[in-house]
Amino acid sequence: MKFLFHKPLAFLLPVAMFCLQSEDCAGLNKTEASGAEIMKEVDKRHQQFPYIYEEQSLVMLDRNGERDTRKARRYLRMEDNGSVKFLLLFDDPQEIKGVALLAHRHPNGITDKHIYLPAYGQQLLESAGDENGDNFLGTDFSVENLTGEIISDYRYKRGEDKQVDSVKYFVIDVFRQSSSLPNEKILRRHYIQQDNLFITLTHHFDKHGRIARIQSHHDLKVVDQNMLRANMILMENKKDQHLSLIKTSRRIFSHDYVPEEIFTAEWLFKNYPYVEPAEELNLNSTLESKETPE
């Protein structure tokens, strides 16, 4: 298969891939390491902080050049018992304010994922969100893309290393943990920079083995020693000719910004109840005044 290295399209500002030229794959045998060993080292090098707060913009561009922009906040909290709580909360535009993705990975590895839509009342809608084609709220990202890949849920197979523009990559194919058939279907292919062990490119495949989406990470920043974060994540939907870009404008690692109570349905119901659009409220008030006898 031809190696497709994704380049940002015209609507994006130019971004540079940040490399730690002085760093190497410490403790990893580049020649003999297996796919699983490389992924474990990737996770170890860039593992999550226990408390993360981010402010993000989500820009979507369709095949006609129409652009849709949303603003959101992302919260992540890791507990001492190994559980992980995640919340993505939309603030703008007004019609989607309060819409949220709430996920909780329990210590046993089981993950609950729910979506809150204020217009549906005080209830959470369960979301499987594990399929490559399961897009979240009209974006090109699946729920799993947003909450992160859990290493223990998948099998990893190392392919032939690649080199593009003097940058060397590990190539790792991702399969379901439960699948071991000779004709098993590939889910994703990660391209990992060997100099910093960061996944800068991922090809997502459809059920026919064709590349359906291309995910690339840009504007990498050092946040702690060798740990990196991407300030821009681009997902290109090849089939629908649609793009989604997540840009992080603010990132804070602090316990105070991710209190435990915000990861609950009760907190969402209380702080983001359904509110009728202003137009409907004005119309209802007008009708009521006309019906009131003088």
Image (cartoon, rainbow, N blue to C red):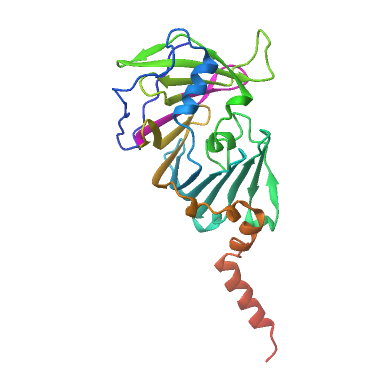
Question: Can you give x and y, in whole percent of width and height, for residue 230 in the image?
Answer: 40, 35
Q: Measured from the top left, where is residue 118 in percent x and y?
A: 63, 57
State which quadrant residue 208 falls in: top right
The C terminus: image quadrant: bottom right
Residue at left 47%, top 7%?
A: 32
Lateral position of residue 198 relative to residue 74, left or right: left
Q: Name the spot of residue 75 as percent of width and height, x first.
A: 52, 47
Question: In the image shown, does 129 or 286 lie closer to the viewer?
Answer: 129
**Magenta segment main secondary structure:** strand
Q: Position of residue 25 (x, y in %)?
A: 39, 19
Q: Nearer the viewer, residue 59 or 153?
A: 153
Does residue 206 lie above or below 136 as drawn?
above
Can residue 214 be seen at all in this image of the molecule?
Answer: no
Q: Which residues are the magenta region? A: 202-222
- Is residue 206 one of those drawn in magenta? yes
**Residue 222 visible in the current orientation:** yes
Instruction: Please say whether residue 32 is one of the residues in the magenta stretch.
Output: no
Q: Is residue 49 above or below residue 262?
A: above
- Residue 81 falls left or right of residue 231: right
Name the residue rendered at 47%, 40% in the picture: 49
Quarter of the rendering containing residue 180: top right
Residue at 42%, 26% (x, y): give it.
Answer: 198
Residue at position x 61%, y 77% from top? 286
Q: Nearer the viewer, residue 253 or 279?
A: 253
